[in-house]
Each structure stands twice: as C-alpha cells, then as structure tokens.
Amino acid sequence: MSIKNYMLYILFATVVIPFSLFAQQSESNSAFFSDVQADLKDSQEKIVSLAEAIPADKYTWRPEEGVRSVSEVLMHIAGSNYFLLSFAGIKTPDNADENMGKDVTQKDKIVEALKTSFADLYNNLKQLNDGQLDKQVKMFGQDSSIRTVVFTEMGHLHEHLGQLIAYARMNGVVPPWSK
C-alpha cells in the first residue's frame, strides 16, 4: 500500500465514516422521533387545511362568550408551537409565546403564522435526540421529562384539532380530509 493510499484510508476511516454515520443518525434520529414527525405532519396538514377552509368572516366566531374564537384557537396553536418546547430548553423567538396574536383576526396572517410556527416546530424537534428524552425538566412547575414535553406538544395539537373540527362543523364547514 502506497503512502498516498494509506493516507486516504486513514482520512476515510477517521473522518468520512464517522461523519456519515453521524449524519445518518441525526437525519433519521429514531423510531420515536420518526413517529413524532409523522404525527406532527398529519396534525399540521389537518389544522392548516381547516384554517384555510373556514371562511374569513367566521374567524371571530366563538361558541359562546368567554371561549376562544376560531382565530384565537389558531393563534394559540401557533404560539404554543414555539412555547411548549421551551420546557425542553429550546429557545423561543422573542415575539412568540402561548398568548401571541390574540388580537390577530385576519385569515391570511393567521394561516401564515401557523405555517411558520409548524416549520419552527419541525426544526426544533430535530434538535432533540433519544439520549435527551429522559432528561428531567420542569414543565408548568412539575417534574417532567423531555419525552413528556414532546407528548404534551403532540397532545396539545390533537386537543385543538378536535376543537377546530367542532368549530368548523358548527359553521357548516366539512373538514377537507373527510370529504
């Protein structure tokens, strides 16, 4: 083996192989995070499609006084997409929190805010890995794990998806995926 081939072998063994293994691991992450990403994609598609299907003049509709309106639910989802993962140590943008946009009622702005928040949520989930899931954190003053934070995020999306389905049906809107 020539010195040149030997050096290439060393370079390949010490740099290329470990880097490619790391890249594969961080891209696919794990079965847990693959399942989370798939569930997130489904929730996002349904929530955004409902936001797009509900007429703009129904965005201020609420089932009764003291209950969130359509626009408030949608902006609450957007804000929580940023906020909830902050319990896992992920930095939240300065202008985003669980209460953001309570006064925003314009459909186009809300749909854009939702899409942006979901993109951010995907990117933030990619920062987490299996080794962090058991790490203990405080969430709403309670001892929790990062795994619980992720479950809470996903459960929160499903909770408000159900709420939006009910709101849509009460306003004569059939969820697009069920037509």
Image: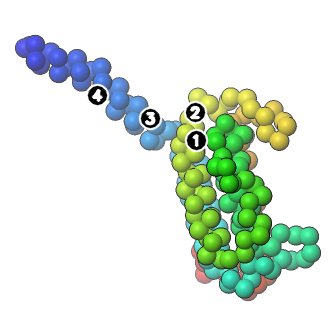
Residue closest to the eye, 47 or 78: 78
Q: Residue furthest front?
A: 94
Quadrant of residue 64 within the rendered picture? bottom right
Q: Are marks 3 and 1 in contact (CB under 8 Å)?
A: no
Residue visible at 19% across and 20% down?
Answer: 9
Which quarter of the rendering shows the N terminus?
top left
Which quarter of the rendering shows the C terminus?
bottom right
Q: Which-is-in-front pick, marks 3 and 1?
A: 3
- Name which of mark 3 and mark 2 comes first in the sequence: 3
Spatial CA span between label 1 and label 2: 8 Å
Structural crowding at the residue carrying mark 1, measured as other residues with C-alpha within 10 Å and reported as few (<14), some (14–19) or many (≥20): few
- Name which of mark 1 and mark 2 comes first in the sequence: 1
Q: Are marks 4 and 3 in contact (CB under 8 Å)?
A: no
Q: Which mark is residue 16?
A: 4
Element assignment for label 4: helix
Structural crowding at the residue carrying mark 3, measured as other residues with C-alpha within 10 Å and reported as few (<14), some (14–19) or many (≥20): few
Spatial CA span between label 3 and label 1: 13 Å
Amino acid type at mark 2 = Asp
